[in-house]
Image (cartoon, helix red, strand yellow):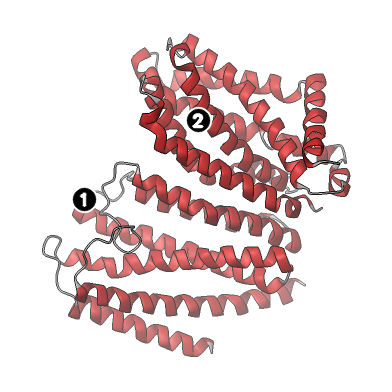
Amino acid sequence: MMFARRAWIVLWKDLLTERRSKESLNALFFFALLLLFLFEFALGPDRERLAAALPGLLWLGFILAGILGLGRTFLVERENDCWEGLVLTPGDKGAIYLGKLAVNFLLMAAVEIVLLALFGIFYNVDLWGSVVPLSLVIFLGTVGLASVGTLFGAMTSQVRARELLFPLLLLPVQVPVLLGTVKATEAVLQGLALAEVGHWLKLLAAADLVYLVVGLLTFEFVLEA
Amino acid sequence: MTRWLGWLAALGLVAGLVMGFGYAPKDAVQGNVQRIMYVHVPSILTAYLAFALVLIASVGFLFTRRTEWDRLAHSAGEIGVVFTGLTLVSGSIWGKPTWGTWWTWDARLTSTAILFLIYVGYLLLRGMVEDWERSARYAAVVGILGAVNVPIVHFSVLWWRTLHQPATILSPERAPISPPIALALLVNWIAFSLLFAYFLSKRLSLRRLEEEAYA
């Protein structure tokens, strides 16, 4: 079977499971809403202050949602005893990684869109005006988040203290992505052109590429039971 | 062999102190405080060396599955964390009199702290996975990702407003450095590298004993 087709099957299977169980998405949407309120309570109702902190809060929200959501796709495999099935799949294991990465990306993207809309409404920020450049920044950041999260999620799903270990591994590695995305989001929300943040976008793209390649190459070693 | 390395390292450190305090001139602007550089810079270079070894050993382990590689990665990782910690502490002590603050969220400081955190996570992972073989495999993957992440973290420095003086040794355009200072730095660097080799050799034999004890 072709590489892309095997990745697609993993993606399709997980999307179907998610559509029928709605296990992750419902919880993550609610979590996003909770975060929004928490940020508001922590920083006070001052709109200007919230709007100024928005890029940071936004990405903090994405990353926190990622910590909860990203590890789950492999936990499901373990709990349902499907891990062996994945290991026994013939061919390059990178396809499974890519499929799972795509699932995680879509999951995160869905949560991010909801969180963005909520931020726009509750904090009274006009996000619509910069939706195209913002989408690009969010796309690059989410690929970085999901590519590392998928790799580490597969790893920690086999570890007893997984809830603890997953963020401990993910967060430090994600710092360059966080720096880049927050800076770029800030600039984009101020109405600056994308060219102004070109260097950050390049950094994010490079980080995505590096994480993707490492993930594809090392995933087979993680998948072994 | 280990013992000889230990003596060589001790000798090197003494020579480094003599060079740093006796031979190198006092900094015109910062005064004697600047001499902390002879600890600060070799520490981070040693840490980089250690993490480079982690990368090589991790790749080696995944290709060959030989315990020797895992042992090397584990030992180098631990020592790298120690030297990164030393860099952060010595930098903090240097920062207080020159910048007026122990810590600032300058990018270079932050990225070194992040490096520290990545490898503390790496060591935590090793501690939290019970199975030796699995722990070695996972650690190798994290070791590789952590190392390839270093340039990404490092380059974010160049685009961030920074208090830190520009890098002299690892920068694309070399800043001028006076020859006596460079020589003192070189001696200290060699001394720290010897110290690293000594620690590594000690830690490797310790790890071998650990394996025997748990086997």
Name which residue type carries label 1.
Trp
As displayed, is residue A66 above or below residue B117? Answer: above
Name which residue type carries label 2.
Leu
As displayed, is residue A153 above or below residue A21? Answer: below
Looking at this view, name the residue that lies furthest to the front: A2
Mark 1 surroundings: few (<14), some (14-19) or many (≥20) residues within 10 A: few
On what subunit does the disc labeled 2 rest? A
Q: Which residue is mark 1?
A: B99
As displayed, is residue A220 above or below residue B212? Answer: above
The image quadrant where one finds the N terminus of chain A is top right
On what subunit does the disc labeled 1 rest? B
Q: Which residue is mark 2?
A: A60
Can residue B9 be seen here? The reply is yes
Residue A224, percent across and down?
80, 53
Residue B196, percent across and down?
46, 75
Instruction: Judge from the rendering whether residue A171 lies leftward or rightward of residue A223; answer left or right.
Output: left
Residue placed at 52% from the left, 19% from the top? A36
Mark 1 secondary-structure assignment:
helix
Residue A213, percent across and down?
63, 48
Residue placed at 14% from the left, 64% from the top? B31
Mark 2 secondary-structure assignment:
helix
